[in-house]
Amino acid sequence: MSIDLSSIPPLQQPTPPSNTLLITNLQDAEIFRADNLQTIKDLINASAPIHSWAPLKSFRRIIASFFDEDSAIRIRQILDGEAIMGERVKVYFGQPTNIEPKDEHLNLPDAGKLFFISPPPSPPHGWEMKLEDAPNKQVHAEDLAEALAKLHHKPRTDLPASPISDGEQEPGRARSGSSTTIYHPSEHGCSPNLPAISVEDLTGESNISPIETEKPILAHTSRPPVELMET
């Protein structure tokens, strides 16, 4: 005859003593009334001073911690198996509670990252405030402003060849005697594929659009078929 012990759960070691007690099996909701909780706390506090007291109504238990393990062991021996409002309570040891005071403040961030915080903290030691420069009041670039200032100057004779020959003239626009080069290929790498750009002064000249000088086209449309005219 043999006995199969494979279905037996493994042996669980009891929780070692600690300064924290779990008072469980508090099924009556009346226990968690403020006056009843204060009565239970005063009775326990008379036997051993309580460090922390946390009633958990939804879990039907109370977590209490003490200043040493001996006090927790003594209270467990008193309460375990006792009836509170008709219910026999069960008391277990919980995880140890740290009763030593500790600094719960956050550490200061790295000094090199202080300016990434919004709003930023105080400036570092030795920082001096200085007046910033006024905003730029110059609207145009220097080279463009210089080119615009030369529009009414005498024409330059060293201009590069233009796609329009000297004998040709753009239809509908009179040629002016004053022009200024804004962009010259020789000043920007002498690339043969870049044209020269010049500005002509047309002040006082008449600008006639080639579209306005063209005559309107008179065209007659044929009469539609009779079949399409019937309603």
Image: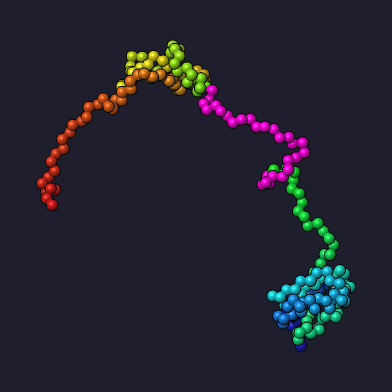
Q: Residue furthest right?
A: 70
Q: Residue at x 67, y 47 (%)?
A: 118
Q: Is residue 98 above or below residue 173?
A: below
Residue 70: percent from left, percent from top? 89, 73
Q: How many marks?
A: 0
For residue 203, say whether it is visible: yes
Residue 96: percent from left, percent from top? 82, 68
Q: Is residue 58 above or below residue 216?
A: below
Judge by depth and name the residue closer to the eye, 47 or 222: 47
Q: Which residues are magenta?
A: 116-142
Judge by depth and name the residue closer to the eye, 55 or 11: 55
For residue 19, say whether it is visible: no
Judge by depth and name the residue closer to the eye, 227 or 12: 227
Q: Residue at x 78, y 73 (%)?
A: 63
Quadrant in the picture for residue 166: top left
Prevailing secondary structure class for the magenta stretch in the rendered image? loop
Is 66 one of the magenta-colored residues? no
Is 119 one of the magenta-colored residues? yes
Residue 186: percent from left, percent from top? 50, 18
| Colour setup of the view | rainbow
Q: Which quadrant would the N terminus be assigned to in this image?
A: bottom right
Q: Is residue 29 above or below residue 107?
A: below
Q: Residue at x 33, y 17 (%)?
A: 168
Q: Residue furthest left?
A: 226
Q: Residue at x 82, y 70 (%)?
A: 65
Quadrant in the picture for residue 80: bottom right
- Residue 199 placement, left or right of 208: right
- Residue 224 placement, left or right of 181: left
Q: Is residue 143 above or below residue 57?
A: above
Q: Residue furthest bottom?
A: 1
Residue 209: percent from left, percent from top? 31, 25
